[in-house]
Image: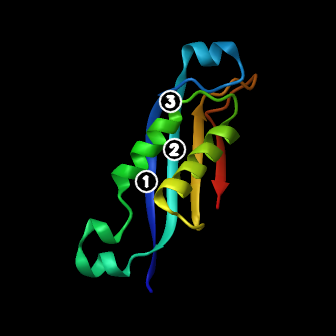
């Protein structure tokens, strides 16, 4: 078994997450990052998508979850992790990170970020 890391970084979405009514009405920019540890030996030999994780499937599942409004980034990240785990059969060794641009914290803050590790 040869372990490797697969990452999708900077998946960009416009969504309506937030506790404030204005956040849900106006929407905001969000970034989602995904990484997982996997056995990549077969894919390295066969060059066949069936032997690895389909990146487009990961993106599609993340995109669907991002369109469902939530108050908290923690909730968004947990929903994405749950969906990836159940639909892709990921058995731990992965991380989902959700970042929100310019969160309303009463001062200057470029991004708020929550990570979920399984």
Dot 2 crowding, Cα within 10 Å, few <14, some 14–19, many 20+: many
Mark 2 highlights which residue?
A: 32
**Rendered-image quadrant of the N terminus:** bottom left
Measured Cα–Cα span from mark 1 to mark 2: 8 Å
Q: Choose mark 3 or mark 1, whichever is in front.
A: 3
**Rendered-image quadrant of the C terminus:** bottom right
Q: Is residue 40 left or right of residue 50?
A: right
Which mark is on residue 92? none
Measuring 52% from the left and 38% from the top, which residue is drawn there?
Answer: 65
Contact, mark 3 vs mark 1 (Cβ under 8 Å): no
Which is nearer the N-term, disc 1 or disc 2? 1
Measuring 54% from the left and 55% from the top, which residue is drawn there?
Answer: 86
Q: Choose mark 3 or mark 2, whichever is in front.
A: 3
Measuring 55% from the left and 30% from the top, which residue is drawn there?
Answer: 68
Contact, mark 1 vs mark 2 (Cβ under 8 Å): yes
Measured Cα–Cα span from mark 3 to mark 1: 18 Å
Mark 1 highlights which residue?
A: 8
Q: Is residue 28 left or right of residue 4?
A: right
Contact, mark 3 vs mark 2 (Cβ under 8 Å): no
Q: Is residue 104 left or right of residue 93?
A: right
Q: Could you say which quadrant of the image residue 27 lies in?
A: top right
Mark 3 highlights which residue?
A: 67
The location of residue 66, given as percent across then percent down, is: 52, 35
The location of residue 108, given as percent across then percent down, is: 68, 27
The location of residue 43, given as percent across then percent down, is: 31, 75
Nearest the camera: 113 or 116?
116
């Amino acid at each position: 078994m040869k372990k490797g890391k697969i990452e999708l970084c900077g998946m960009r979405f416009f969504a309506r997450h937030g506790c404030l009514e204005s956040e849900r009405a106006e929407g905001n920019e969000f970034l989602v990052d995904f990484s997982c540890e996997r056995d990549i030996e077969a894919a390295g030999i066969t060059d066949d998508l069936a032997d690895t994780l389909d990146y487009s499937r990961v993106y599609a599942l993340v995109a669907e979850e991002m369109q469902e409004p939530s108050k908290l980034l923690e909730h968004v990240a947990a929903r994405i992790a749950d969906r990836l785990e159940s639909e892709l059969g990921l058995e731990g060794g992965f991380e989902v990170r959700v970042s929100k641009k310019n969160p309303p914290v009463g001062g200057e803050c470029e991004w708020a970020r929550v990570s979920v590790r399984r």
